[in-house]
Image (cartoon, grey):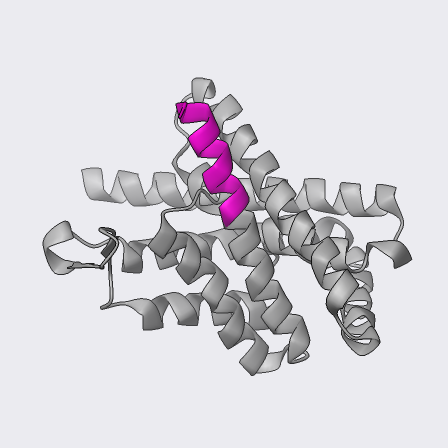
Amino acid sequence: MSTLLVTYIKAILAGIAIGIGGMAFISVRGGALGAFLFSIGLLSVFIGDFYLFTGKVSSIVRRQQIPWILMILFGNFFGATLMGILYRLIASPDSIEFAVDICNAKLLEGWRVIPLGALCNMLIYIATLFYDVPAEKQMRSVVGMRINLENPIPVILCVMVFILSGFEHSIANMFYFAAASSSLRGLDVLQYLGLNILGNAIGGILIFRLHRAGKEK
């Protein structure tokens, strides 16, 4: 199987995982419980070694990596949107109404989605630092993957903090907008997601470079 195909498949799986987290969030009507349950999405990405835009964009250091990160972004979009469409078909009317309310509130944020997206990806990067431990501290699962079973709690806390603080995760929002799409204007959604993606990229790249510079001192 080609490297490009593997990358795209892992990106789709990451979008699906985040979509499942979004389903859980909507199903319990958000709040602290919803934020806690949403963390299953990011933990699944870590455990499965899936490719999530918000995690991978942080480490971009060369322009040659841009096509690779765009492939991941489109794969995430496909996976998250697919889950949003599926959820719209099977969820209760009350759940879809809650998704619509979430999305309408997001569309009122305007330019603020850029700093909200940046802060979100700073927390995502911090979550990866908790989870990225040396191999000798990891446990091998029955399917041969190395899984860090020591630090899921800090990862869950990072996810809960960014959700409860109102920070914006572009891939999660792709799921929410797909779940509520029949009640939203497409151009408004595309503009919002574009600004959200920009904010995620700014925050991730900034904290990665600051962290790397700090380690070089």
Q: Residue at x 78, y 75 (%)?
A: 92
Along the viewing direction, whichever of 90 and 201 lies nearer the viewer: 90
93 in the magenta segment:
no
User: In the image, 26: left or right of 103?
Assistant: left
Q: From this viewpoint, which residue is outermost toward the left?
A: 136
* Rendered position, 162 above or below 198: below
Q: Quadrant of residue 126?
A: bottom left
User: In the image, 184: left or right of 58?
Assistant: right
Q: Which stretch is magenta?
A: 1-13
Along the viewing direction, whichever of 180 and 202 lies nearer the viewer: 180
User: In the image, 83: left or right of 178?
Assistant: left
Q: Is residue 26 visible in the rendered structure shown here?
A: yes
Q: Position of residue 201 (x, y in %)?
A: 53, 40
Q: Position of residue 217 (x, y in %)?
A: 18, 40
- Please tell me whether the stretch drawn in magenta is mainly helix, strand or loop: helix
Q: Residue at x 39, y 27 (%)?
A: 61
* Rendered position, 79 above or below 38: above
Q: Quadrant of the N terminus?
A: top left
Q: Position of residue 86 (x, y in %)?
A: 71, 57
User: In the image, 12: left or right of 80?
Assistant: left
6 in the magenta segment:
yes
Q: Residue at x 30, y 54 (%)?
A: 129
Q: Residue at x 34, y 73 (%)?
A: 153
Q: Tell how many labels.
A: 0
Q: Is residue 119 visible in the rendered structure shown here?
A: no
* Rendered position, 113 above or below 65: below
Q: Position of residue 110 (x, y in %)?
A: 78, 52
